[in-house]
């Protein structure tokens, strides 16, 4: 049972509800959001009549959620959540495409890609600074320098930045640069990491583990939501099956299933989902057709020289083709591609979002936090964090440009 309190409910009102839940044998768990308190009563859902609880002072409504994930469920929040990531809405009518190299390799290369994407219809820039590689001998990423280059690319192009965080102790560092914190497939059940990103207010891109069920994926999202961060975007990226002709089997079933079970936006990664560039465009079309709220694809100007995942990276011409074809599918379904430069007021009005807090802020799922209500990071809720002093005025770095290799 989930009890959503009025924004003006007093601490006494909250205490009274907790006591009532305890009397019924339920364990109360208080989530303190920015606007209101939400109390979960864990235990037998039939132990207490929700209508009785609704009559208590300060209670706005009571929701009985039968799913193991509560805050992520459609039962809790029937309407779709729109997550605004650096000004780009995920979960509305518009379909954003996140694109970029697998790894950040060099300044010149990253700026070349970002500039192209901005012109070609990319909504956000992806790029790994910290890379989880299957082999310890594979390229591990540029780390801090990669973060700096991503922030520089954002400054130059205006594209928000999506990058992976691999460990709880990295969250503060990555959150200082990124607009979206990516949790990779291998970390989907790294629960301390999920909690750490949950304590920020940065949008989180949660990739599905390649051996995780949809329910496990949604429970992973629940870890983030339960810490008070409502800005979760789910990403299907392929699962491991007996099939060997593709790197993974892109599970588009899961997109349809997840969309019916959760209010969170669901996007698709056809690059890792297939592992071969010739299949990326067809599966991108299919993803949009099945109802995905966005795409994330790997793009590299010279895929044969990429330091990681060159096989599945599109070149620039292929990315343009993807945009055209996906746009046609979106239009056939009454949706459209998100493009920067669409007049912002109109875009926001159509999507029902004005700012990151706009649409989510209104309803229950948007604003719960943990009982302690402590934001984990110094700058919660800021959609954009400047390049920062570490960038040293964003001066070009010849050292890195030279060391970058592939680019
Ligand atoms: Mn990759």
Image: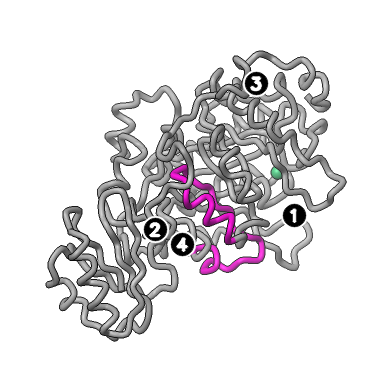
N-terminal-most mark, 4 or 1: 4
Of the four image quadrants, the one with ligand 1 is top right
Residue at left offset 59%, top offset 55%: 193
**Extent of the magenta region:** 191-218
User: Label 1, label 3: how many angstroms apart (C-alpha)?
Assistant: 29 Å
Q: Toward the viewer: 302 or 195?
A: 195
Compute the Cα span from label 4 to label 2: 12 Å
Cβ of mark 2 under 8 A from ligand 1: no
Q: Position of residue 34 (x, y in %)?
A: 30, 48
User: Callout 3: few (<14), some (14-19), or many (20+) C-alpha neighbours within 10 Å?
Assistant: some
Is there a contact, CB below 8 Å, between mark 3 and mark 2?
no
Comparing 58 with 349, the one in front is 58
Query: Residue 370 — which label?
Result: 2
Residue 261, x across and y down, in percent: 41, 65
Quarter of the image for the C terminus: give it: top right
Q: Are the two marked residues, 1 and 2, in contact with CB atoms closer than 8 angstroms? A: no
- Does the closest atom of ligand 1 sit within 8 Å of the Cβ of label 1? no
Answer with mark 4 or mark 2, whichever residue precedes in sequence: 4
Picture quadrant where residue 28 is located: bottom left
Q: Secondary structure at mark 2?
A: loop
Residue contact between numbered discs 4 and 3, judged by CB atoms under 8 Å: no
Q: From the viewer's perspective, is 211 left or right of 376? A: right
Q: Is residue 216 located in the magenta-colored stretch of the structure?
A: yes
Query: Residues under labels 4 and 1: Cα distance?
Result: 28 Å
| Disc 1 target residue | 247
Label 3 sits on residue: 111
Distance between the alpha carbons at the discs numbered 3 and 2: 39 Å
Q: Residue tagged by mark 4?
A: 222
Question: Within 8 Å of ligand 1, the CB of disc 3?
Answer: no
Q: Secondary structure at mark 3?
A: helix
Tell me how far mark 4 sits from mark 3, CA to CA. Answer: 36 Å
């Amino acid at each position: 049972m989930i009890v959503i309190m009025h924004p003006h409910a007093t601490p006494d009102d909250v205490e009274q509800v907790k006591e009532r839940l305890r009397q019924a044998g339920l364990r109360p768990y208080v989530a303190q959001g920015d606007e209101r308190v939400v109390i979960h009563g864990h235990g037998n859902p039939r132990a207490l009549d929700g209508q009785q609880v609704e009559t208590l002072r300060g209670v706005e409504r009571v929701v009985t959620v039968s799913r193991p994930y509560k805050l992520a469920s459609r039962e809790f929040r029937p309407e779709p959540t729109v997550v605004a990531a650096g000004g780009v809405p995920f979960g509305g009518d518009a379909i954003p495409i996140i694109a970029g190299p697998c790894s950040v390799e060099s300044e010149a290369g990253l700026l070349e890609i970002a500039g192209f994407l901005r012109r070609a219809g990319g909504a956000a820039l992806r790029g790994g600074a910290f890379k989880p590689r299957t082999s310890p001998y594979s390229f591990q990423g540029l780390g801090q320098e990669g973060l700096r280059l991503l922030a520089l690319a954002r400054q130059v192009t205006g594209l928000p930045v999506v990058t992976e965080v691999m460990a709880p102790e990295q969250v503060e560092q990555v959150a200082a640069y990124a607009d979206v914190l990516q949790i990779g497939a291998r970390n989907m059940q790294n629960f301390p990491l999920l909690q750490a990103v949950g304590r920020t207010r940065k949008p989180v891109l949660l990739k599905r583990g390649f051996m995780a069920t949809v329910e496990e994926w949604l429970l992973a999202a629940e870890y983030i939501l339960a810490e008070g961060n409502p800005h979760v975007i789910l990403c299907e990226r392929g699962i491991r099956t007996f099939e060997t002709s593709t790197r993974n089997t892109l599970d588009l079933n899961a997109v349809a299933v997840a969309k019916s079970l959760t209010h969170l936006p669901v996007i698709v990664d056809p690059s890792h989902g297939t592992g071969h560039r010739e299949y990326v465009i067809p599966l991108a079309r299919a993803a949009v057709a099945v109802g995905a709220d966005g795409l994330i694809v790997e793009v590299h100007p010279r895929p044969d020289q990429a330091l990681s995942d060159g096989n599945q990276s599109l070149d620039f011409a292929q990315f343009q083709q993807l945009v055209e074809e996906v746009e046609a599918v979106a239009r056939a379904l009454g949706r459209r591609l998100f493009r920067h430069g669409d007049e912002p007021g109109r875009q926001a009005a159509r999507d029902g979002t004005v700012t990151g807090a706009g649409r989510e802020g209104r309803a229950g799922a948007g604003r719960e936090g943990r009982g302690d209500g402590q934001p984990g990071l110094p700058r919660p809720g800021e959609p954009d964090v400047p390049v920062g002093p570490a960038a040293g005025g964003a001066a070009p770095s010849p050292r890195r440009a030279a060391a970058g290799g592939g680019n």
